[in-house]
Image: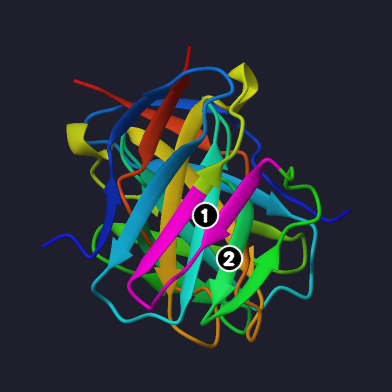
Amino acid sequence: GESVGLHLPTLSVQEGDNSIINCAYSNSASDYFIWYKQESGKGPQFIIDIRSNMDKRQGQRVTVLLNKTVKHLSLQIAATQPGDSAVYFCAEGFFGNEKLTFGTGTRLTIIP
Amino acid sequence: DAMVIQNPRYQVTQFGKPVTLSCSQTLNHNVMYWYQQKSSQAPKLLFHYYDKDFNNEADTPDNFQSRRPNTSFCFLDIRSPGLGDAAMYLCATSRVGGATEAFFGQGTRLTVV
């Protein structure tokens, strides 16, 4: 079956540096992708999404890049802060279908 | 203000004893989901409601049931919890038309003893 997965399960970044979290997906027909942040003991929190007809979208300190040629999605976090420490999940979905498929997740640790 | 509220945050139940987890929302969203999340794993969809229509995932065990008496509330019933059912249970909601910006509750952590 098709799946969404991540290249790296853990990532440690020095505070203030930029971080890049990667995600590989296999369903080229997905209409959109979402990045979620999940802090310990909490539910996932929406960060940013991108539609399949876009290749870049920026938010506050975050940028998502979509490379459909290689089916790759990345989340860039600028000037990381201790509060960015969390597990980050990518997820994919289809318009008109209520379901999301989550990837494995990457644990980001910010080193003071 | 919390928009998707799950109660309780922590639940301890005995092996084989039925347990119900609850979720309420103030967003008036049509779709409500229940996910199971085990340690260091991605959330796994158990089932969801689109309005009153129940949609079960093919691999969700019969031990898991759900009720949605109205738009605001949705319940997860585990009829006979086993040790393998210990997990975080997440409720989420979204608007009609797609799962973009699904809003998650804080989850209920279930322990089975």
Residue lying farthest to the top in this orientation: B113
Above or below residue B90? Residue A100 is below
Is residue A32 toward the left or the right of residue A3 in the image?
Answer: left
Label 2 CA crowd tier, 10 Å (few <14, some 14–19, many 20+): many
Image position, residue B32 (x, y; %): 47, 68
Gap in Å between the C-alphas at discs 2 and 1?
6 Å
Callout 1 amino acid: Trp
Q: Is residue A62 above or below residue B12?
A: below
Q: Residue at x 51, y 62 (%)?
A: B67
Q: Residues within 10 Å of mark 1 (few under 14, many from 20)?
A: many
In the rendered structure, which segment of residues is drawn in magenta? B63-76
| Residue B30 within the segment the image draws in magenta | no
Disc 2 marks which amino acid?
His
Residue at (64% x, 86% y) in the render: A96
> To which residue does mark 2 refer?
B48
| Residue A62 spot, x, y in % from top left | 33, 58
- Quick one: label 2 or label 1, which is nearer the N terminus? 1
Query: In the image, residue B97 lies at what x, y percent?
Result: 54, 88
Res B98 → quadrant: bottom right
- Decide: marks 2, 1 in contact (CB < 8 A)? yes
Q: Is residue A21 above or below residue B96?
A: above
Near-viewer residue (B3 or A75): B3
- Specify the quadrant that holds the C terminus of chain A: top left
Q: Which mark is residue B34?
A: 1
